[in-house]
Amino acid sequence: MRGHLRPMSVKADPVTGNLVDRMARDIQAGVFAPGMWLKQIDLETRYEAKRMEVRRALDQLALKRLVRHVPNRGYHVHTPDDRQAEEVREVRLILETAAASSVVANATAADIAELHALAQHFADLILEGTLLDLYEANIAFHAKLLALGSNRELINIVWELRGRGPSAPVTQWKTRARIEQSNREHFRMVEAIAAGDAGALRRLTADHILQTALQMEERQPAQGDGGA
Amino acid sequence: MRGHLRPMSVKADPVTGNLVDRMARDIQAGVFAPGMWLKQIDLETRYEAKRMEVRRALDQLALKRLVRHVPNRGYHVHTPDDRQAEEVREVRLILETAAASSVVANATAADIAELHALAQHFADLILEGTLLDLYEANIAFHAKLLALGSNRELINIVWELRGRGPSAPVTQWKTRARIEQSNREHFRMVEAIAAGDAGALRRLTADHILQTALQMEERQPAQGDGGA
DNA sequence: GTAACCAATTTTGGCGCCAATTTCTATACC
DNA sequence: GGTATAGAAATTGGCGCCAAAATTGGTTAC
């Protein structure tokens, strides 16, 4: 029952999988507001997908906690409450700092150069890019950084966790000062890796995560559980 | 709103949700051997479920990495390789030790008593119970222990992670010596909590997780990814 | 005797239809 | 005038059917 690997191309559900990712990105990017009801018909047209693919994708997103399912009413974008957001941040802090030493250990000169380039790309977009560009550049930087860790499970979990918190571009950087703060920290992280200083990377990572926590506190608590 | 509001018991997909849990338990318990192909018709009859529920549950389990999906061939029980098992253990180590202090902080006298009772239940089953009974008693103990942590996200992740590793009862405790080792550690954990000694609980938790690593096969503990 | 090939059966997976439920709208009643 | 009620429209979600694909089993050629 177990063997029989055939040399067949491993296509891991390209259709549904892609749709889940696309929808997840759109939710993260703020295309769908938190609390918003996702009507299947709209999704069908927007993504040019069959009804069943939409349903499946919604189920997957519900399992990922990005949307919530209410039995005979449909699916709506999940609004993480403050407590949950804080808890997610805490877990991220634990895991990302724990990964720091292996990131430092695994980084080659080429990796460091690439990281620097990504940080620079982010820096360049501060002046010329849109907020969405910045958001994606930031994602790219952190993806590369995280990928240096040796523990793939840890990477997966952190990545999933990242998508769980309230990280819509607008929410994430309210002021230019915050953006530039993030930017500086990116470069410092690269320097820490280049210097082989795991401790410094740990501290910087912690600060970087906690910084977004502070941003949240600054903004006034609005909108309850969406809907309405 | 209109008329009178219904009790609206929070039923979070009771049908499918239950099926996912049941199948997950069966996979964990070793009812389905690793690598085994899960035919939809068999599952239909075994769980007395509709075809569509089975399909949905399989999708969810695939997302949880308990089964793998091969496009036109079906779903088979995922066999975690050694590397992945090691990585899962490492993440568990990071998170469970990180949770130790909040577990100690939150535990009331009643909690400690209940934990002791669960540990005792495990101890009793060493002589009189089956391996499956032991497995479930162990789960119950650790569930209660973990639930004392204040970070619910962390609890969820660890719980999901627990299901991911190779934890079939037979695999988990090969010898009676190992079982009794686990048993002793349970009581020591309770004592550590009762004494309010978070450091001790951390160490015991680490040992407890690493112990199962040793059981699998004598392998060098991979690089510590840094502590937390 | 082995290997390849073809037919038959089994299994997966997609699609559309329709029932159950909810939400919206208009009407009547207090 | 506001509210409850009934009917209509819209939406979700379940179910069965059928085609595509894979596995199995048997047969034939070498």
Image (spheres, coloured by chain):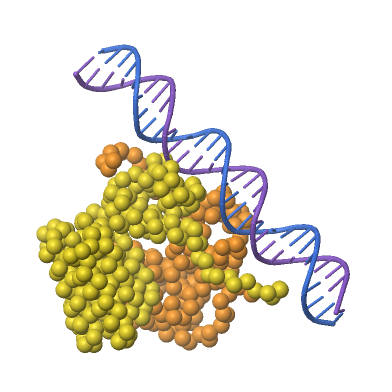
Chain colours: A orange, B yellow, C purple, D blue
On-image quarter of the C terminus of chain A: bottom right
Q: Note whether residue A214 is visible.
A: yes
Q: Is residue A172 above or below residue B80?
A: below
Against B215, is A8 above or below?
above
Assign the N terminus of chain A to one quadrant of the image: top left
Q: Count numbered badges in the picture.
A: 0
On the question of residue A147 being in view, the answer is: no
**The image quarter in which residue B41 lies:** top left
Answer with the quarter of the image where residue B72 lies: top left
Q: Is residue B106 left or right of residue A27?
A: left
Q: Position of residue B217 (x, y in %)?
A: 14, 57
The residue that appears at 48% across and 75% down in the rendered structure is A80
Residue closest to the eye, A207 or A63: A63
Residue D23 at x, y = what percent?
Answer: 35, 34
Identify which residue, B9 or A3, lies in the foreground. B9
Residue drawn at x 16%, y 58% is: B174
Which of these two is toward me, B114 or A8? B114
Looking at the image, residue B47 lies above or below residue D18: below
Q: Is residue A81 left or right of residue B26?
A: right
Q: Residue at x 46, y 67 (%)?
A: A65
